[in-house]
Amino acid sequence: MAAHSLNKMLTAVDRWYRRQGRSLPWRIGPKERDAGETPDPYLVWLSEVMLQQTTIPHATPYFETFRKRWPTVQTLAWASWEDVSAAWAGLGYYSRARNLHACAQAVAELGRFPQDAAGLRELPGVGPYTSAAIAAIAFDERVMPVDGNIERVVSRLWAISSDRTEAGWRAAKVVISGKAQELADAQQKDGRAGDLAQALMDLGATVCTPRNPNCASCPLWDFCEARKQGEQERYPMKAEKKVVPTRYGSAFILVRGGEVLLVRRPPRGLLGGMMMPPSSAWTDEKSEALDGAPGAFDWKSAGEVRHVFTHFALRLDVWTAEAGSKAKIEGEWLTHEDALAGTPTVGRKALALVLKATARRR
Ligand code: SF4
């Protein structure tokens, strides 16, 4: 696209962002920036890590909790892993919580966040997308963080096609990133690169939606190839989805008075270091129901919970038993509230099944 068209697109997007951009708890909007406020790289980083793979309404309360409890990267670095992992519970992808904590410690040691994408990428858990997002939003570097929203907008603007195979979609993504970067490069050197990135994210989230995009109110109407073809919803042409395999396991909810037993998972691997009800290994086929039970109690079935991770779906048989006050079991006895608050979503689903059944029996 010719430079003058790119400039017109930037102007149209900027005008739209000033009027229609979303107000978000971690964002410094254009008016605040006009008034001299600058984004805090710590809050930008925190929000970006939380928003990977989850929605704004789900991530917002977690963001507020972290901001209040650990208002600076140094305070987060000094926090214990137990406190950080408990506060993270429910956000999923627990390796990210580990990286979050490790990254805070690395930044605290450096004294501040590196100021560009290349430096940011050296931090634990900070990949190409997150480094570009922090560099653009916090430091106005002219790089484009291509999230799902920007990917959709750009693929439609230039009608970037693929044959929907994995390889074809990978190739299309390279073209999308290149076009997105052309937009970033077209900005003034001393411009607000963060505003452009956030404007395109907002446009994708509120106007250029996956279904029924509202093209009539889009600032990029004149420039959009997919709209001219009348084929907006064909883009982006992602690879056809593979069916994820199913794994099976059992979870054991041992209760004692008003308490329930949780154990900490090994530090590496899925849900590493998180508190969970004791459970069997998760395998491709169902094994003996009580394999992995923490002791010979009078186990009763409480039902099944299902949970989908990125690479597999889990079906977990849930068992429950009462433990006598003298039973010696490894793990931590927690109140129902603390256990529910401190375990990831899959653990919470299993606990909720039993605690509901207990409440019904009372
Ligand atoms: S014109 Fe429609 S399809 Fe094109 S970018 Fe705007 S909302 Fe998306």
Image: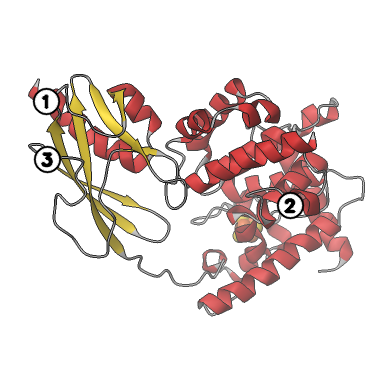
Locate residue 264 relative to residue 95 in the image: left or right: left
Name the amino acid type tagged 1: Arg
Locate residue 341 relative to residue 168 in the image: left or right: left
Mark 3 to mark 2 CA distance (whole Å):
49 Å
Say which element carries label 1: helix
Of pointers 1 and 2, the one earlier in the residue sequence: 2
Say which element carries label 3: loop
- Which residue in the rendered view is the most extreme toward the right? 189
Dot 3 corresponds to which residue? Answer: 296
Of pointers 3 and 2, the one earlier in the residue sequence: 2
Name the amino acid type tagged 2: Glu
Name the amino acid type tagged 3: Ala
Q: In which quarter of the image is ligand 1?
A: bottom right
User: Residue 152: which quarter of the image?
Assistant: bottom right
State which mark lies toward you, 3 or 2. Answer: 3
**Mark 1 residue crowding within 10 angstroms, few (<14) / some (14–19) / many (20+):** few
Which disc, if any, is residue 122?
2
Frontmost residue, 286 versus 240: 286
Locate residue 353 relative to residue 308 in the image: left or right: left
Dot 1 corresponds to which residue? Answer: 360
Say which element carries label 2: loop
In the rendered image, the quadrant that contains the N terminus is: bottom right
